[in-house]
Image: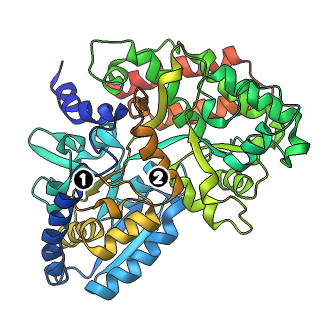
Amino acid sequence: MNKVSKVLAFSLAALMSLSTLAACSSAPAAPASSAAASSEAASAEVSSQAASAEGAKEIYYLNFKPEIASVYDEIAKDYEAETGVKLNVVTAASGTYEQTLTSEIAKDEAPTIFQINGPVGYQNWKDYCLDLKDTELYKHLTDKSLAVTSGDGVYGIPYAIEGYGIIYNNAIMSKYFALPNKKAKVSSAAEINNFATLKEVVEDMTANAKALGIKGVFASTSLTTGEDWRWQTHLANIPFFYEFKENTAFPSTVLAGLDAKEIAFKYSDNYKNIFDLYTNNSCTKKGLLGSKSVDDSMAEFALGNVAMVQNGNWAWGQISKVDGNTVKEADVKFMPIYTGVSGEEKQGLCVGTENFFAINSKVSADKQKASIDFINWLFTSDKGKSYVSTKLGFIAPFDTFTDAEKPSDPLAKEVLAWSSKKDINNVAWTFAAFPSQKFKDDFGAALLEYVQGGKTWDDVKKVVIDGWKTERAAAAK
């Protein structure tokens, strides 16, 4: 294994162990008493931050997540009021972060805090990443091996553990299971544990849509450019997880994927299974999916027009803020994304992280310090932690959080609950190995043509297989 592979192995071995979530064990790994002690120590760190940031009165964070942009606006106001340091938050449009970062980092007033997408992202931005091994936030990281490292340096600190799957409204599901004419053999959503059962339930729900008061079982499969990441990245994660899992020469599916110059797309039919189920049982006709956004999908779910939608725990913020939201917190649940793979009865949610803070090494030392002070404040001060848990909804991997400070929103609690189930194996986030954004964009474009009838499934497979080979070869030059 070459030097880079060894570095990636060190950085990612524990990350992939999130299939059991041992790294954070319901997010922070420390017991409540230990976390409380860490929190007390952190308060001393926070008290000096206003003074330490005196050399820089403005910092700039390029935010990756549009769905929480408004929360960062609130944070910026509170942070400036408390410290006198202005936090300028710019949010990249969905699917454009790399392009936006490329443009912004070349400016005189470049981002002082930005995000890298794991070890692959670090390779793209290593010339701009400051070594963070001596920062207080890194010291509070419960599992140091989750950080992005190179040699003796630490260049990316993870700030959230996340999970995604099929979100469902249990009130609608319960209404279906109470129908006297239902055909499904199972009697609750909790009993669905494979694709065959999911398909049986979904198709029968479609047949009973009028009785259930829904417009479709699934929310719109958003295929607008920049809005298709749920399919060309998150859903695509599953077949590649299983394909790379078969390569036992590597300790993780990401490392196996990074080493793969070519792919077989062996589990493409499994991908097709669930993708077709989504689009054939949707509230939106296939010909209109190219105009639909993620926000459209989440609104459809929030308004009770559909029973299910694929997304992650971060989606609760979107659901809860929709005007006219009818979904009760107690009814918002997760189930794994089943595709028909053998043994999937023991499959859990897709759990991992792609969220790593990096500090711009090219800005002044004062701005670097002020930026580090901000992220430390966010995850160690009482006010910052309150934002993290209650408004950002992050499952934070730091020992500064007590049990009482874990996120209370229903989807974060579902991620924690699924991660603690015995004999259930979470699916590691393998998409970190995807060769490029172009590979994902081309995959998404092919999916749109497929649902519109312009491509066969074999055509889609060819785009994916050829695209991987081409992009991997281009990256190696």
- Under tag 2, what secondary structure? helix
Circle nearer the N terminus (1, 2) = 1
Q: Is residue 27 left or right of residue 391?
A: left
Where's residue 163, x and y in %?
46, 43
Amino acid type of the residue that numbered disc 1 sits on in the rendered structure: Tyr
Q: How many marks?
A: 2
Where's residue 473, x and y in %?
39, 21
- Name the foreground residue: 277 vs 345: 345
Residue sitting farthest toward the right: 210
How crowded pointer 2 is (Cα within 10 Å; few <14, some 14-19, many 20+) is rated as many
Q: Is residue 92 above or below residue 29?
A: below
- Name the foreground residue: 405 vs 90: 405
Q: Is residue 39 above or below residue 459?
A: below
Tell me the quadrant of the picture where the C terminus can be found. Answer: top left
- Under tag 1, what secondary structure? helix
How crowded pointer 1 is (Cα within 10 Å; few <14, some 14-19, many 20+) is rated as some
Q: Is residue 378 above or below residue 197?
A: below
Residue located at (28% from left, 52% from top): 28
Q: Is residue 166 left or right of residue 436?
A: right
**Residue 466 visible in rendering:** no
Which residue has dot 1 on it? 128
Which residue has dot 2 on it? 412
Residue located at (22% from left, 52% from top): 129
Amino acid type of the residue that numbered disc 2 sits on in the rendered structure: Ala
Q: Which mark is residue 180?
A: none
**For the residues marked 1 and 2, what is the alpha-carbon distance in whole angstroms?**
32 Å
Tell me the quadrant of the picture where the N terminus can be found. Answer: top left
Mark 1 vs mark 2, foreground winner is: 2
**Residue 269 visible in rendering:** yes
Residue located at (36% from left, 23% from top): 253
What's the colour scheme?
Answer: rainbow
Image quadrant assignment for residue 138: bottom left
